[in-house]
Amino acid sequence: LASNCRPYAPFAYSLGDENGLRHPPEEMSELEMAAYRQYLKKGYGNNIALLNNAWNSSFEDFEKVETAPPKGNEWTIPRRYDFLDFWEWVYADMHHWMRDALRKGDPDAHVGAEGSWGGNLELTVSKLDWWAPYEDRLNNAILRFWTPWPAFRGNWWGSYSMGSARLHKKDTGELWRNLVMGSVNASLFFIADVCAEGMLAADGSYADFFELWIPQLREICDTAGPLLRASE
């Protein structure tokens, strides 16, 4: 796929929208359990006594570790943390693997994802070229420090022109809010299509709600946008 796309110089490759990955303990397969045990073995320095002390358990070795505690017993905080941290590592690793796969076909590929759960956000973005979550003040602030400026950073949002009164109003605060938060250098709104969420009407003209945004977009691009970009 990437090798076929490369001649067209794609601006970016998206690994998806609303990505997420986590299993309840009772649904883990044998392959997942094997990976989980290796993760624990590495994390506890191959010392089962350290794990048992943290988990309040009595496993003989790492190969005997199970996710579900004995019936009626609650997990200790370290045990729950280890389980959640494992899946956040898997989640990040899957994104990194897909980025490497795309880079084989297109060495210049800029790979990331939008509108997705970050998990261990620092780990997830460590080997990606961009990240565009839904608007969140904390995540946006963190991304300022964990992604280099040349990488584009944005918030995913769509027009939802059939169902969102907020984006129909003349108040185009959506555009300004993404800008003045100072955490992104691009707002990624996937509305360039002809559909219920698109900015184009069936005849190819701009949808009514998008017509309201054009003056604001021009003002941002001519004044505030370059100014904030330079100040960063």
Image: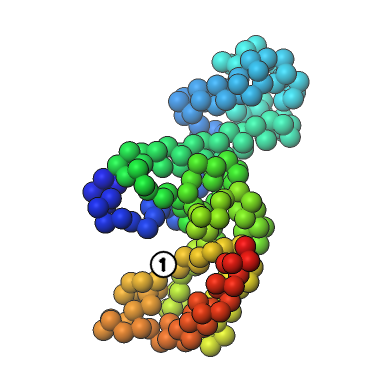
Q: How many numbered marks are there? A: 1
Q: Position of residue 4 (x, y in %)?
A: 23, 49
Query: Where 114 sits versus 169, above or below?
Result: above
Q: Split into 4 quadrants, where in the image is the C terminus?
A: bottom right
**What residue appears at the point 46 percent right and 77 percent down from the top-left corner?**
163
Residue 139 appears anywhere in the view: no
Which residue is nearer to you in this view: 231 or 10? Answer: 231
- Left/right placement of residue 172 relative to residue 102 reads right
Residue farthest to the front, as pictured: 230
Quarter occupied by residue 41 = top right
Residue type for callout 1? Phe
Q: Residue under circle 1?
A: 190
Q: Circle 1: is it few (<14), some (14-19), or many (20+) Cα within 10 Å?
A: few
| Point 55% across, 55% down: residue | 149
Q: Position of residue 69 (x, y in %)?
A: 66, 27
Q: Residue at x 51, y 79 (%)?
A: 222
**Rendered residue at 62%/55% (across/down):** 144
